[in-house]
Image (spheres, rainbow, N blue to C red):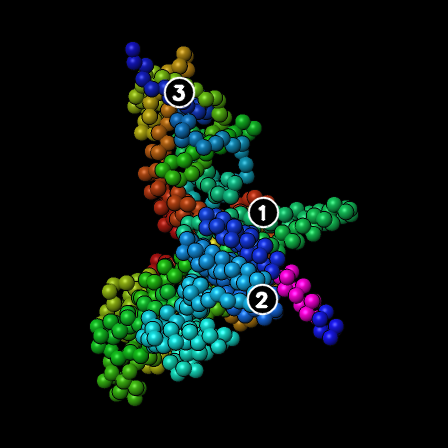
Amino acid sequence: MEGENSEKDEMKEIVDEFIVEANELAEKAIQDIVAIENNPDEEIINSIFRAVHTIKGTSSFLGFNTLSTLAHRSEDVLGMIRKGNLRPDQEVADALLEALDLIRTLIEEIKDAGAEQSDIARAVERLEALTDRKKLGKLLVDASVIDADQLHEALKKQEGEEKEKKLGELLVEDEAITEGQLKDYLNKQKTRTYKEESTIRIDVKKLDELMNLAGELVLGKNRLILLNNLVKKSDTKNHVLDNLADITNSIEVVTNELQLSVMRARLVPISKLFSKVPRLARDLSAEFKKEVGLTMEGEETELDRSLIESLHDPLVHIIRNSIDHGIETPEERVRKGKPGKGLLSLKAYNEGNNVIIEVYDDGKGIDVEKVKNKAREKGLMGEADLAALSPRDAMNLVFAAGLSTAAKISSVSGRGVGMDVVKTNVEKMNGQVSIDSEEGQWTRLTLRLPLTLAIMRALIVRVVDELFAIPLNTVTELVKPQEGSIKTVDKKEVLVLRDKVIPVVDLAKVFTGNIQENNDRYIVICNIGEKTIGIKTRGVEGQEEVVIKTLGTFLGNIKGVGGATIRGDGRVILILDMSALVDHISFQNAYRKTA
Amino acid sequence: MNEGRILQLVTFKLENEEFAVDILKVQEINKMIDITRIPNAPAFVEGVINLRGKIIPIVDLRKRLGFEGREYDKSTRIIVVELDGIILGFIVDSVSEVLRISESTVEPPPPLIAGIESDYIEGVGKLDNRLLILLELKKIFSGSDRKELEKAANNN
């Protein structure tokens, strides 16, 4: 008997202790709630949360279920406030105060009578009205999946004997909703709260500012690396310099991460652009009396938001072309043994630091001979050059200025904007465009765009005595030409590389008109769209990440120069505009032919 | 007694002439630094410099105004100005001082001074025995320049 007594005593001791502690906690929490109503301070909210949590835990352990339930519901509300999902306004504070007052009453009852007596239903309902639990019910009622009575029934059950069960489960048990519906609505509930939590709207200007600052930091980082390398070379060993190396490393890592994050903040999914396509395709199909089925892939692919805007017009033009000139009329298609409904398919995906957008149609393709004829007619190229063109190169002549879309085997002409406009626009974005086709079968346009316009990797080369940056995404290889591997064909220099003949650009000549003594040691081979050119350089300094800056309106129009960047040592170097250089070669050719 | 507005001017030298520009247009005055040349740019555009992370074009004012070119030396300065939102720098032989003169002492330009087209001149300020040529920067770096720049961009 004595043992039982001592056990009882021990229990009483614990309960007494709990009563004292809980009273203190509740007292403090009540004061705090009044405080957060005016000033939602995180620390105070956390302190209330902890207090209520302790009351909940201990009361549940001691078997005071009513108290525990009330504390639990209060905790739910506080949890939402803590996460920022609920503003502690007067309504919320009132509900919490009522609950805590009741908690104190319950504690008093336990102290005096050893058991809970008060009814908590009203307080619980009020708290639940503030939390998601109620919202699921409200969501379902609003969507007329259940009616208010069913909800009330379930809530009542939950307060009664089925405390452990969730509202959703109870509703399923009552056969008010199905499992599937429950899942759907729980998801809806989640996505809504998720969105509220995880996104904010930011002025693009602010993002641009951040981007600029990150860019400056990248330059600073590069200078630091440069300095560090100098120190390493100087061969002095000491503790301070080791520290410098460590700091440089960590700054490099952090800066790279920062730059990436800021860049990502500017990325938006391409669905922003793709979402306009179905309507466009529908209208165009009606306009040109074609039947077109549309498929789209990779809408979640992200790219810089400024690119999305600039991509709109070229994409509209390409799609217009595909439906107007590419896809045949249903009758014609059936005659050719194709399904009457044509296929237009858009695809976007990432490839390294590029975003690729493909527009494919299963229309009549490109008649290479017709394109060549047109080029001949317009005097774009000489006979010999035309003959030497590969079919693919010939197709890509559709991008040449002056060769209008009307040249593309078509009965209906475009609206006077040629594919050259598409090309110019894409190249303005530092991108490339190319076309591939099988006559009678399909056409595919491929746009290759950088993820961002602001930063790129570049190869730094020395031409005569100036440094230039070549966008690294165009560089395919670096060649040290052997004696005699550079030949002159038709007064133009070409490099013979693995049986391929590559035209060579002498930048010194392009930029100054002077022919320098020949001490260029390397040739940088670059791929621009479908074209390959070699650039003569005296030396190669290495790869670097460069922040692209414009030369401004005062100097923005210099041919062959796409922009400038500031190197680690603070010097400005120019970034080459590769497509302008290619045009330069083509133009030279055309000029020679017609002259 | 109407003395008119007081003008605050930055004065500088080219050859033996003294020039002045409105101090409100001037952002800063720098010593000569490394200039990156720009191919295909008009002759008077010396190139670009890095001004604390911004890339700004540099114009040789001697060449722009038709003086003989001259080696840069210790007193050579770059005056950075802002014109209609465009920031650019121009090279002068030396910067003299900041002056306050009354607007009433400024006279309209004679048809031709120092071989410079009067279009570029806002007026001439008389100061004891000195003559200050007040430059109209906007005209110097717009209009014909733009055309010339475009020509440079297209003549390939």
Give the residue type that dot 3 points to: Leu
Q: B18 or A71: which is nearer to us?
A: A71
Q: Secondary structure at mark 1?
A: helix
Question: Which stretch did the figure color magenta?
Answer: A7-18
Contact? badges 1 and 3 (CB < 8 Å) = no
Identify the mark nearer the N-term, 2 or 1. 2
Q: Return the residue at label 2.
A: A114
Task: Inspect the magenta stretch and tell me whether residue A526 lies in it.
Answer: no
How crowded pointer 2 is (Cα within 10 Å; few <14, some 14-19, many 20+) is rated as some
What residue lies at 50% left-to-right and 39% top-to-bottom? B51
Task: Inspect the magenta stretch and tell me whether residue A9 lies in it.
Answer: yes
- From the viewer's perspective, is A374 left or right of A482? left
- Point out residue A407 in the picture as x, y percentages from the top left corner: 28, 70
Q: Secondary structure at mark 3?
A: strand
Q: A478 or A189: which is nearer to us?
A: A189
Magenta stretch secondary structure, dominant:
helix
The answer to whether residue B119 shows anywhere in this view is yes
Evaluate whether label 1 is on the same chain as label 3. no
* Spatial separation of the CA atoms under disc 1 and disc 3: 43 Å
Q: Return the residue at label 3.
A: B132
Q: Chain for mark 3?
A: B
User: Which quadrant is the C terminus of chain A positioned in?
Assistant: bottom left
Q: Quadrant of residue A593?
A: bottom left
Instruction: Give above or below for B91 relative to A144.
Output: above
- Point out residue A374 in the picture as x, y percentages from the top left corner: 30, 69
